[in-house]
Amino acid sequence: MQLKGKTALITGASSGIGEATARHLAKAGAHVVLAARRKERLARLAKRIQDETDVQVLTVATDVTKREQMEALVRQAEEELGSVDILVNNAGVMLLSFLEKDKVDEWEQMVDVNIKGVLFGLHAVLPGMLKRRDGHIINISSVAGHEVFPSSSVYSATKYAVRALSMGMEKELARSGVRVTNISPGAVATELTHHITDTDVTDRFAKQSLTPLESEDIARSIVYAVTQPENVNVNEVIVRPTNRR
Ligand code: NDP
């Protein structure tokens, strides 16, 4: 129960890595604020966490691309639970496509969710964290934020941006008591690939024989980062599958 009394806000908590992270942080004792657009999925997760733990759970339907909604989310969390001590900027979309397909709407959606969502999260929590001189921001980048492969140009651009933001935050905030961790997962079995519309990409995925990580594997690395002693700032974690079951 190392996180007893802390409050963690997780964006994209309605599935995959965000859902597993919320459960693991709650099991470590943190009250959790669950944010995403799908209300019914958040309600189901809230019930599960309440059955498994005795922490407080708040669900708030939120679109991370809307600045006012992110501000309202954090305001509500601070009013009802006192403070946001940990922010997990996890919400993201990976609409892989080849550039020649010109899926400009999907490029825009990735920029909005993956970059603006992280910035609006930072904007909403930072005043409270700076005031308390305490806080931890976890940004979920990707191995696609370390390398680019055909069809990942725009997605990778957004995840390189997340890493750049993590590095900047770390340098600017370290002395203010706000810690920053950038997590870069390799392939994880989630709903992330379900939204890809470029059939040349989905065909290639179908032929892959990779054994992906599970969301819990990433959740554990997040719990590791936020449960270190106060003098330790875990800045970068890369987690790749071994391809062994
Ligand atoms: P999922 O598709 O399972 O989860 C994505 C989450 O993001 C959902 O909860 C979704 O909720 C939320 N989301 C999407 N758009 C918005 C929005 N506009 N506002 C609020 N929430 C939104 O995928 P993962 O769990 O895999 O993805 C989580 C993060 O991990 C992403 O940032 C992804 O890029 C990153 N990642 C994933 C990898 C993988 O292989 N799975 C590898 C590397 C990084 P809802 O639709 O309800 O709003």
Image: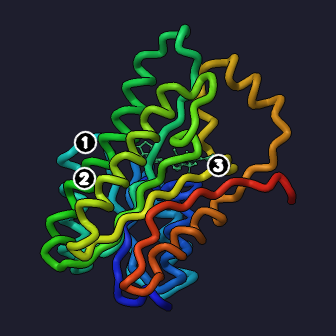
The answer to whether residue 148 is visible is yes
Badge 1 marks a residue whose secondary structure is loop
Q: Earlier in the sequence, mark 3 or mark 2?
A: 2
- Labelled disc at residue 54: none
User: Residue 172: x and y, percent?
Assistant: 23, 60
Asked whether the residues under the numbered discs 1 and 2 touch, taking CB atoms below 8 Å apart as contact, a structural biologist would say yes
Instruction: Give how far across and how far down residue 176 sits, in percent.
Output: 20, 73
What numbered label is drawn on residue 70?
A: 2
Q: Which residue is at a point 35% across and 88% down the rendered structure image? A: 5
Q: Which residue type does callout 1 highlight?
A: Lys
Tag 3: amino acid: Gly
Residue to which mark 1 is pinned: 66
Kindly report the distance in space between the C-alpha atoms of the residues bearing marks 1 and 2.
7 Å
Q: Position of residue 187 (x, y in %)?
A: 67, 47
Q: Nearer the viewer, mark 3 or mark 1?
A: 3
Please report the residue visible at 34 percent of the width from the left and 77 percent of the height from the top. Answer: 7
The amino acid type, in three-letter code, at marker 2 is: Met
Numbered label attached to residue 186: 3
Q: Percent from the top left, x then y, of residue 35?
A: 38, 58
Closer to the N terminus: mark 3 or mark 1? Answer: 1
- Residue at horizontal 25%, vertical 49%? 120
